[in-house]
Image (cartoon, grey):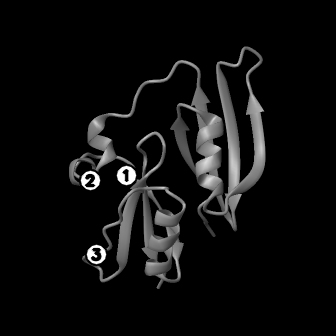
């Protein structure tokens, strides 16, 4: 009956964020901007997942606590989204070769899945996790 329709994030620079997420295979889907350019909205699509990106001219910075799972997970609210991969080692190689981050620390989660986290250009947490 239900499915995940989209994930929404807010960013400081639309073009930079679109370039970042397109590295993972997201493609342009829809976009809109206010006449006064106070806000831009772009939707990118990866398979059946839509990433809705908001870019306000007047924005508030992401709190430092939200940039690390150690400080963010204990706080109530939405934490991150995850991109699934077939082979975690190949994903690690991809992010390092594409200079998406400088280092990757693959961990095994409490539920037995291998994963690692990266930050997007605004510090938003993105989990890379091996599919079941």
Residue drawn where x is 48% and y is 43% of the image: 121
Q: Residue 53 placed where, x, y %?
A: 61, 41
Determine which of the numbered discs, if any, sits on residue 109 in the image: 3
* Residue picked out by circle 2: 73
Q: Residues within 10 Å of mark 2 (few under 14, many from 20)?
A: some
**As rendered, which of 103 and 55 lies closer to the eye?**
103
The mark nearer the N terminus, 3 or 1, is: 1
Identify whether 115 is placed above or below 23.
Answer: below
Determine which of the numbered discs, if any, sits on residue 61 in the image: none
Query: Going by the image, does 83 lie left or right of 42?
Result: left
Residue drawn where x is 39% and y is 57% of the image: 102
Query: How many numbered marks does the figure carry?
Result: 3
The mark nearer the N terminus, 1 or 2, is: 2
Q: Residue 132 placed where, x, y %?
A: 47, 85
Q: Residues within 10 Å of mark 3 (few under 14, many from 20)?
A: few
Looking at the rendering, which quadrant does residue 25 occupy? bottom right
* Residue picked out by circle 1: 79
Work out how far the residue at label 3 is from the one at label 1, CA to CA, in angstroms. 16 Å
Work out how far the residue at label 1 is from the one at label 2, CA to CA, in angstroms. 6 Å
CB within 8 Å, label 3 to label 1: no
Residue drawn where x is 39% and y is 49% of the image: 78
Q: Judging from the image, what secondary structure is the residue with disc 2 in?
A: loop
Q: Residue 104 placed where, x, y %?
A: 35, 65
The mark nearer the N terminus, 3 or 2, is: 2
Residue drawn where x is 32% and y is 73% of the image: 106
CB within 8 Å, label 1 to label 2: yes
Identify whether 81 is placed above or below 18.
Answer: below
């Amino acid at each position: 009956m239900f499915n995940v329709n989209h994930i929404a994030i807010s960013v400081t620079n639309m073009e930079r964020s679109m370039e970042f997420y397109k590295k993972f295979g997201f493609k342009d889907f829809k976009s809109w901007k206010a006449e006064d350019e106070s806000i831009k909205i772009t939707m990118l699509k990866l398979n059946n997942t839509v990433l809705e990106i908001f870019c306000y001219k007047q924005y508030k910075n992401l709190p430092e606590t939200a940039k690390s799972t150690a400080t963010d997970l204990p706080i109530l609210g939405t934490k991150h989204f995850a991109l699934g991969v077939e082979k975690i080692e190949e994903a690690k190689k991809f992010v390092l070769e594409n200079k998406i981050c400088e280092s990757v620390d693959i961990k095994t989660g409490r539920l037995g899945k291998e994963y690692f986290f990266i930050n997007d250009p605004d510090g938003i947490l993105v989990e890379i996790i091996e599919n079941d």
